[in-house]
Amino acid sequence: MPPSRLAPTDLYLLREGTHSRLYEKLGAHPAQEGGVRFAVWAPNAARVWAVGDWNGWSDADALAPREDGSGVWEGTAAAAQPGHAYKYRILTPGGEVLEKADPFAFQAEMPPATASRIWAGAHDWGDGEWMAGRARRNGLDAPIAIYEVHPGSWRRGEGGRFLNWRELAPLLADYVNDLGFTQVELMPVTEHPFYGSWGYQTTGYFAPTARYGTPEDFMAFVDHLHRRGIGVILDWVPSHFPTDAHGLARFDGTHLYEHADPRQGFHPEWNSAIFNYGRNEVRSFLLSSALFWLERFHIDGLRVDAVASMLYLDYARAPGEWIPNVHGGRENLEAVHFLRELNTAVYREHPDAFTVAEESTAWPMVSRPVGMGGLGFGMKWNMGWMHDTLDYMAEQPVHRKWHHHRLTFSLVYAFSENFVLPLSHDEVVHGKGSLLGRMPGDDWQQFAGLRAMLGYMWAHPGKKLLFMGGEFGQRREWTHDGELEWWVTDLSGHGGVQRWVRDLNHRLRDEPALHRVDFSGAGFEWVQADDEDHSVYAFVRQAEGAPPVLVVSNFTPVPREGYRLGVPRAGTWEEIANSDAASFDGAGWGNFGAVETAPVPAHGRPQSLVLTLPPLSTLYLRGPLSNGATT
C-alpha cells in the first residue's frame, strides 16, 4: 500500500483546527505507484469503502481506519483513474448504509447526478502579470466597481443551454471592460444540487459546479479575465449547507459537520444545516476550502455569505429556540473564533487578496484587524446604506422632503467600517421587482431617477457593487431561468443607463478624489445636507494631490436654476458628469461644461458656484488643483 499522504504535522493541525491545505491530504489523489489514494474523515463510521466506476460500485475497495485516533480512513484503489465517478459507502454505527460524495472532491458529476469525480487536471496559467500587480488593484485606495454575475443566467447559448466557462470568458471580459468594471463577483460556483438555490446551498466546497464545465475550464475562465485586467471574486458560503443525502449532513451517521441539537445545528430560515464551528476538524475543512480557491484557482477575493447568521445564536429564532453561549449571551463565540482564523489565514497566505463580509447588523469592527479585536475582514457590505437609499428612492418625489435624512444618515457611520455599497441580486428577486421598477413616476422619471441614484452611489464613499441587469435598467425581475433581457439595451432609456454606468466607472477610475479615500472622513465633506424642501444634496470628494469633485443630486423632477453652493477652491469647476445629458437619454439640462466661482460666501466657504440642477439628476464638477489653478 502506498504511504499515507498525512504526516504527523497534518494530523496535529487537523485536530487543532488550523489546517488550511487539507485538500492536499484528504480526498482522492492519484498515487505515483498507480491507482488512486482515498482518504476521508469519518470518525464514527463502522466501515468505509471507496465505490465507483472502476469496481462496479461494489465493496471491493475497503478503506482502513488510521490507528492514531484521527478518525481518518484511507486506502488505495488500484484500478481507479482520473475521470471515474465515485462515492464513499459508509456503514454507520447503527447499521445504516450511506453513500456520500467526497467532501474534498475537486470535481462532481453533472447534477442531478450526485457522485464525485476523480480529478488530476492542471492549467498552464498565463496571468503572471496580473498576480504580480493585483495588490495595487485590490487595495483599499483603489477604484473598485464590482459587477455581480450569476453565470447561468447572464447569457445563454442556443436553445437556452448554459454557456461553459471558456465560452463565457471572452464575452464577459469584453462586456466588463467596455463598461469599465474592475472586478466580477460570481454568485457561488461551488457545486450545488439545486440550481434554484443560486449556489447558496453548497455540497462541493472544493468543486466548481459541473454545469459550466470542468475545473480546467474554470481555471481558464479566471485566467482569461486576469489577462484582460479583471479581478474575480467568489461568493463563498461557510454559514450553512443543505441536508441532501449525499452531502455533509450526518456524514458518518452522526452529526459530524453540523451540531446535533437543532437549536444550534439547523437553520430555520433556509432549512439547512449549520456548521459546528466548535469542532476543530470542521474549521480545518472550511479554512482549507477558502484557501483552495485562492491558491488553485487564483481567485482575488472571497465574499463571505450570511455572516450575521453565523455571529448570532438567536438568528431567525424565537425565544427558547436557541442555546446561549457559556456567558449567557447570544453571540456565537465559536463562529467569531473561526472568522478571525479565516481572515488571519487568508491575509497571511495571500495578502494581495481580500475578504468581504455580508454582515447585515451593527456587529462592531467587522473590517478591522484581528489584532485590534476585529473580525479581520477587508471590507463589509453596507446593508444599511442599501436599504435607506432604495427606500428613499421608492418615495414619490413630492414626499421625499419628509424622508430627506435617510440619505444623509449613512454618512454618520460611513467610516466605521471599510464599506462596499451593494445593489445586489437580493434586491431584484422574490417580488421586489427591478431597480428601475422601484423608481416612481412615468418612464422618463424612472430612468432619470435610476441614473441619479447610480450617480449618487458612485460618488458616495465606499466601493461599488451592481448586480447584472441593473447597469442597463432591466425592467423585469431577475430570474435564474433564462438570460438577461439584452434586447432592451437598444431601446431609449435602457441604453442611456448603460452608457451612464460606463461613464461613471471611467470617472471612478480617472478621478482619485472619487476612490482614493473611501474609508476616512478626510475624503468627504458635506456642502448641502439640509435642503429638504428641494431634495438637493451636495458634497465634495477629495484626495491629497488631486482635484476635488463636487457632487450634486437633485431628487425631484423640477429643475433648479440659480442654485448657489459654496466650494472649497476658487477657479473653474468643470462639469465632468451629468446624468441628465442627452447622451444618456436625459433632457439635456446642464451648465455648459464649466462654471466659474464668485467671491460670494455660501455654506461656510468664501467662494461659491451658481448652478443649474437638472431634474432628477446627479452632477459631478471637478475643481481646480488649488485656488485659482486649472486642472
Image: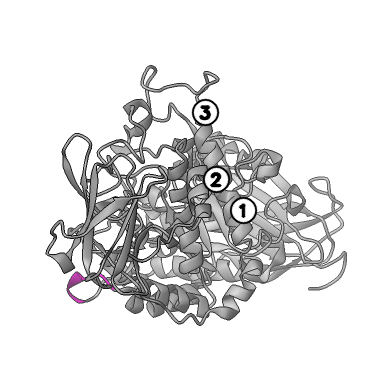
Image coordinates of residue 280 in percent, x first then y, are: 47, 41
Q: Is residue 220 visible?
A: yes
- Quick one: quadrant of the C terminus? bottom right
- Report which residue position mark 3 lands on: 331
Q: Amino acid at mark 1?
A: Gly
Of callouts 2 and 1, the N-terminal one: 2
Residue toward you, 29 or 265: 29
Q: Secondary structure at mark 1?
A: loop
| Residue at point 29%, 52% (across, down) | 64
Residue 275 coordinates in the image, percent (x, y): 39, 40
The mark closer to the camera, 3 or 2, is: 3
Name which of mark 3 and mark 2 comes first in the sequence: 3
What quarter of the picture does the N terminus occupy?
bottom left
SS for callout 2:
loop
Does the CB distance between marks 2 and 1 fall below 8 Å?
Answer: yes
Label 2 belongs to which residue?
382
- Residue at the (17%, 68%) spot, across then down: 54
Give how far apart the Cα atoms at labels 3 and 2 are.
Answer: 21 Å
Please tell me which of labels 3 and 1 falls first in the chain: 3
Left or right of residue 257: residue 420: right
For mark 1, what is the residue? 462
Q: Nearer the viewer, residue 250 or 442?
A: 250
* Proximity of marks 3 and 2: CB atoms separated by less than 8 Å: no
Q: Which residues are drawn in magenta?
A: 158-163
Disc 3 to disc 1: CB gap under 8 Å: no
